[in-house]
Image (spheres, rainbow, N blue to C red):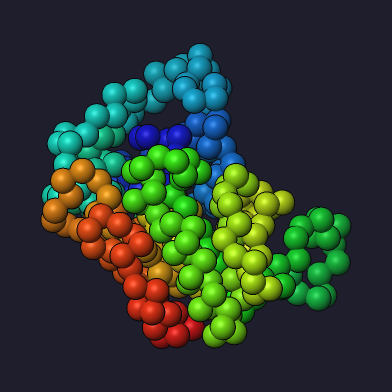
Amino acid sequence: MSYGLIGDLIMGLPMLTYFEKKYPGSYKYWVIEKKCSITAPIFLNHPLIDRIKITDEWSCIGEVDRNLRSDCDIRTTHGDWKHLSPTWYNDVSCVEETARIAGVDDITDVLTEDELKPSLCRWFDVGLPDSVSTYSRTHDSDLSEFDNNIALWPFATGEFSDKHSQLRSPSQNWWGMLIAKLADAGYSVYHYGRHSEPSLSESANYKRFTHLSFFQQVKAAMAAKLVMGPDTGSMWVMGAYSHPAINLITNHMPNHTSNLLALAPVNDNAVNLFGDGCRCDNINTDDVMQKVKEKI
């Protein structure tokens, strides 16, 4: 699979079920590029992953990886991740396209509708009870402060000058307006994501986290009542945990005219709000507030 991006890894999770159904009891390696190794903890304890393998090199496989791959009986496509159609999103979901890129063209025939939904196992706690005092737990973050808030994963990329990225995610001004409304309604807003992302508000109800690892951010966000963001990899993670969410979606890809929720993170517990005109900024913030009140 394409194993160097968080979202792509999540989209590939149904492949584990696919291979288990095709080859029951098979031993499965789950490969993650070293540059994306920060995601490894979320895949621990998955019932169909026998071993997580971080690649030898930063963004490609190395000699040990190649030898391991050659020893496997079944292998997905590697190194030639080309879409069958430049506008695939008009016809198929991200999950199906991820499988097709990996060389599997019958995933929708083999898996049920529920099995096609990416799913992660939450083996960790999202808060620490007062009674916990063991050494192994005292060095973890106390996440109780994160309860009863709204978590934002506001940007799908850190390259804010890129025009496509600006369309894919709401702008800083849009987020600022929404946060002001959330603060006026009494909600606390916690901002997660890359350290390079800008601050979005000066409100006392807004807090930007730059000191937490990705895994700590995931746990903290899951202590929130609700998460919100565009089609970022982190929102795909939230979807795989079925955490209450509001997905902010638009047709930002070229000539995306049908199947308009193709890029929306799969989440049985999410509401999808769509921005017309290829812009997330066209999502009405009052509509967002209404959905927030309905979800919390």
Rendered position, 54 above or below 256: above
Q: Is residue 268 above or below residue 101?
A: below
Q: Position of residue 39 (x, y in %)?
A: 55, 45
On the rendered image, what quadrant is the N terminus found in?
Answer: top left
Residue in view at x 27 percent, y 41 percent: 99
Please give the count of numbered marks on the rendered protein. Answer: 0
In this view, the residue in front, 16 or 173, is 173
Where residue 261 sits: x, y (%)? 24, 60
Going by the image, does 32 lie left or right of 74?
right
Q: Residue at x 55, y 25 (%)?
A: 58
Q: From this viewpoint, which residue is outermost toward the top?
A: 63
Residue closer to the observer: 17 or 57: 57
- x, y (%) of residue 279? 30, 57
Q: Is residue 131 above or below residue 214?
A: below
Query: Which residue lies at the image location 49% right of the left edge and 25% below the top edge?
Result: 59
Residue 147: x and y, percent? 64, 75
- Location of residue 123 by image quarter: bottom right
